[in-house]
């Protein structure tokens, strides 16, 4: 795989802020940081397409005492056997649980699963973290 060099014109203040942040994050150089930003841009585009094959996690914090949240979470996970690869369940305290659901499939379908899970009564907080399958990234 060859490497291509290209120039980018940016305001000096923007470059200074960028350099400060990439230094804080531990990047060795600007090229590594820009490559990561480009990969993130590509992954977000895949998710926007809706029909791209993607992967991700749906993280939920919920009160297991709340109504039927546990049963509904399980029922929904069984509705999406093709896309849900695995889940991890952690007891945070006597009332709260953390569940991480690992998913892979078409972006539109994964968003649908996340929306359904995160909107359940009893889910206090949640988030879909999106990534690609790695097939298209370099």
Image (tube, grey):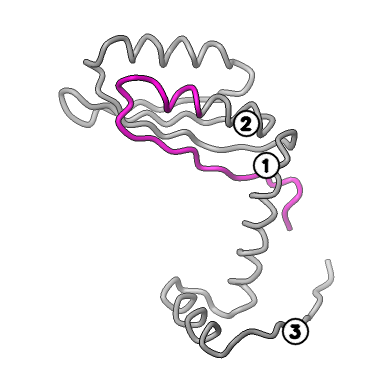
Disc with the residue nearer the chain's start (1 vs 3): 3
Left/right of residue 20 with respect to residue 105 in the rendered view: left
Which element is circle 3 on?
Answer: loop
Q: Residue at x 63, y 84 (%)?
A: 10
Q: Residue at x 25, y 23 (%)?
A: 63
Tell me the CA gap for discs 1 and 2. Answer: 8 Å
Residues at badges 3 and 2 in contact (C-beta under 8 Å)?
A: no
Magenta highlight range: 115-138
* Mark 1 vs mark 3: in front: 3
Which element is circle 2 on?
Answer: strand
Tell me if residue 72 comes above or below residue 32 in the rendering. Answer: above
Q: Quadrant of residue 8?
A: bottom right
Disc with the residue nearer the chain's start (3 vs 2): 3
Q: Quadrant of residue 130?
A: top right
- Queried whether the magenta region covers residue 129, the answer comes back as yes
Tell me if residue 90 comes above or below residue 17 in the rendering. Answer: above
Label placed on residue 104: 2
Label placed on residue 7: 3
Residues at badges 1 and 2 in contact (C-beta under 8 Å)?
A: yes
Label placed on residue 133: 1
In which quadrant is the N terminus drawn? bottom right
Q: Residue at x 39, y 35 (%)?
A: 126
Specify few, some or many for label 1: CA neighbours under 10 Å numbering under 14, 14-19, or 20 or more. Answer: some
Residue 53 is situated, as x and y percent measured from the top left of the image, at: 71, 35
Residue 7 is situated, as x and y percent measured from the top left of the image, at: 75, 84
Which element is circle 1 on?
Answer: loop
Residue 75 is situated, as x and y percent measured from the top left of the image, at: 46, 9
């Amino acid at each position: 795989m060859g490497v291509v060099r290209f120039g980018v014109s940016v305001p000096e203040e923007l470059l200074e802020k960028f350099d400060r942040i990439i230094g804080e994050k531990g990047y060795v150089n600007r090229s590594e940081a820009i490559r990561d930003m480009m990969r993130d841009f590509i992954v977000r585009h895949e998710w926007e397409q809706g029909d791209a094959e993607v992967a991700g996690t749906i993280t939920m914090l919920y009160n297991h005492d709340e109504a039927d949240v546990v049963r509904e979470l399980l029922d929904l996970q069984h509705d999406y056997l093709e896309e849900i690869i695995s889940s991890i369940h952690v007891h945070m305290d006597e009332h709260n649980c953390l569940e991480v659901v690992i998913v892979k499939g078409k972006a539109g379908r994964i968003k649908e699963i996340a929306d359904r899970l995160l909107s359940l009564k009893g889910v206090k907080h949640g988030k879909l973290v999106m990534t690609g399958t790695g097939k298209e990234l370099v």
